[in-house]
Amino acid sequence: MNRFFVSLLSILILLSCGSSQGVEAPNAPEPPKPPKIVSNSNPCYWQQHVDYKMEIDMDVNNYQYKGKQTLVYTNNSPDVLDKVFYHLYFNAFQPGSEMDVRSRTIADPDGRVKDRISKLKPDEIGYIKVNSLKQNGTELKYETVGTILEVNLSTPIKQGESVTFDMLFDAQVPVQIRRSGRNNSEGVVLSMAQWYPKLAEYDYEGWHADPYIGREFHGVWGDFDVKISIDKTYTVGGTGYLQNPNEIGHGYETDVVKKPNSEKLTWHFVAPNVHDFTWAADPNYIHDTKQVTNGPLLHFLYKSTMTNEKRDNWKKLQPKAVELMQFYSENIGQYPYEQYSIIQGGDGGMEYGMCTLIVGEGDFNGLFGVTAHEMAHSWFQFLLATNELTNYWMDEGFTEYFGELAECAIFNKPFEKPTMRVYDIYFYYVNSGAEQSQTTHADRFNFNQSSAISAYYKGYVFLNQLAYVIGEDNQKETIKQYFKDWAFKHPTRNDFIRVAEKVSGLELDWYLNDWTRTINTIDYGVKSVDENTVTLERIGLMPMPIDLTVTYNDGTFEDFYIPLQMMRGEKPTSATIIKDWAWAYPTYTFETTKPIKSVEIDPKNMMADIKKENNKM
């Protein structure tokens, strides 16, 4: 291509590709922000930007609050937008909502939900009611449709343009049923997740105005400035950096505090470059901190009303949480914020920006396990902000993998044991007949169990098996490079596999396609062994390279590696590399130099072969 056309192409790329911008949050440490061209592998990548300023007045007697929201939205897309959408998640907790009906009609409802929403009384439901909405001072027309606010703009938002939306809203915190709410089973008064009108994401696929039916979330990157006025007896923790510890008298950073005279305190938090904001509050929270060397300050908020044994578990957790943070930073990428909070609340464990809400009254092993998982989500879903409705396995599966990896490292346990358990769950899923493709929308699975296995366990196997396909060192380097390339962005499954291809030098589209877009399975077998001739067969539809160990009659053994032809290369290996196997050929034959005693495919059991019994002869 001559220089003129190269220059012209460069100009066209710059004109057609959007950029990501950020507004510096006052008085708060700031992590790195995406540059104008945010991906070397995709120069046309763009993402929207939003800045929230919110003032919330909470009444802890009736669990209602009033909100004032100013939102600055920057359209970095190449499109002109004539409408926007907001999520009103609390509206799901009303009789007759989609979440309610789905829970009462699916074959295996979530045990935490069942028919509980249908039984909520008017003073127990959740709602967010928008009272007014303006665009640059002009009143807008809007309609609430379930958990979505549909908004017609007064003036379209042009490419590169920023507009200001001003909103007033009223809301009621629902009785705690799923993730957020009031008065959970452990007595935490307020678990405030997905509690505010949240602008829906718009990306290369268009709007993501998905109703809240049961699964998880997707949000726009930006800066949050939030003031929460609440009864002065309550302690608040959550996303962001507290700006006024002295003023509120809770001594987050100092013991020299003012004593407030009013009945309410206003907690002021600032969170730079996040895509969500979560908080929790309770009058009986104990607040501890633990500093990670060259890392964030960890905050722990848990109920003082627990038994001594349960409180002791929270004390024991704190040094282990430091180890977890260090492990993830070392093996994935440095945690970029200066705080992370582990908060008793919610209904199990759920990841949020710079914090997690977890149940806190189990035994120590359970408390550590849920913390390990939810903290790992700070990388997989929060910093690497995949869409949890369409790429859910990339956050849950990768998180489950690293949670187990971290626990085994910290407690010096073999990683193979939990990994084999995960593989067994995947095999059960295959044999159940209920498996659906991982491209299935998270709300569209026939069974809740199918969704869970696909997300947590089939996603885990994908990442562990990748080490088999490209080599363990390449897999580790892929994870770190993925973080470097895609932190503070919205990566997709293709973005991940392209990083793996660049790190390994191998072609891997086949792996992504068969594992995530189909329900094809892996099944290779030893068909025959005759003196010094081995014949293998491919029975399943999914292709794989083959690791093979041959044991000879003289007691010696030899490892062989059979490359998959469509990979266009080989992983690093000390095994004897023999000719490629082209997928369309159902059998493969090779000869050895000595008489053979036995042959075994994949002796390390890293390949998710659904019939292990035919792997050995």
Image (cartoon, helix red, strand yellow):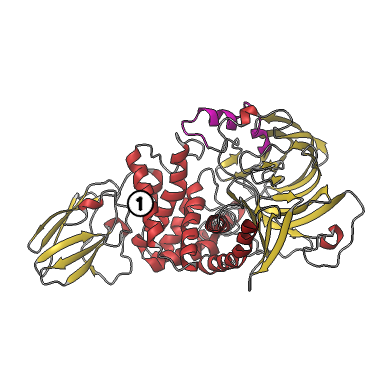
Determine the residue positioned at 53% across, 37% down: 111
Q: Nearer the viewer, residue 348 or 332?
A: 348
**Residue 255: quadrant of the picture:** bottom right
Looking at the rendering, the stretch of residues picked out in magenta corresponds to 87-110
Which type of secondary structure does the marked residue at label 1 adopt? helix
Left or right: residue 226 compared with residue 43? right
Residue at point 62%, 27% (across, down):
118
Q: Is residue 51 visible?
A: no
Residue 171 x/y as whole percent? 75, 37
Query: Considering the image in quadrants, where does the C terminus appear?
Result: bottom left
Which residue is most to the right?
Answer: 261
Q: Residue 404 location in percent, x, y?
A: 47, 59
Residue 363 lies, with reference to residue 189, above or below; the image says below
- Residue under numbered circle 1: 510
Instruction: Let me know if residue 203 is in the magenta part.
Output: no
Three-letter amino acid code of the residue under disc 1:
Trp
- Position of the N terminus, as image quadrant, is bottom left
Residue 170 quadrant: top right
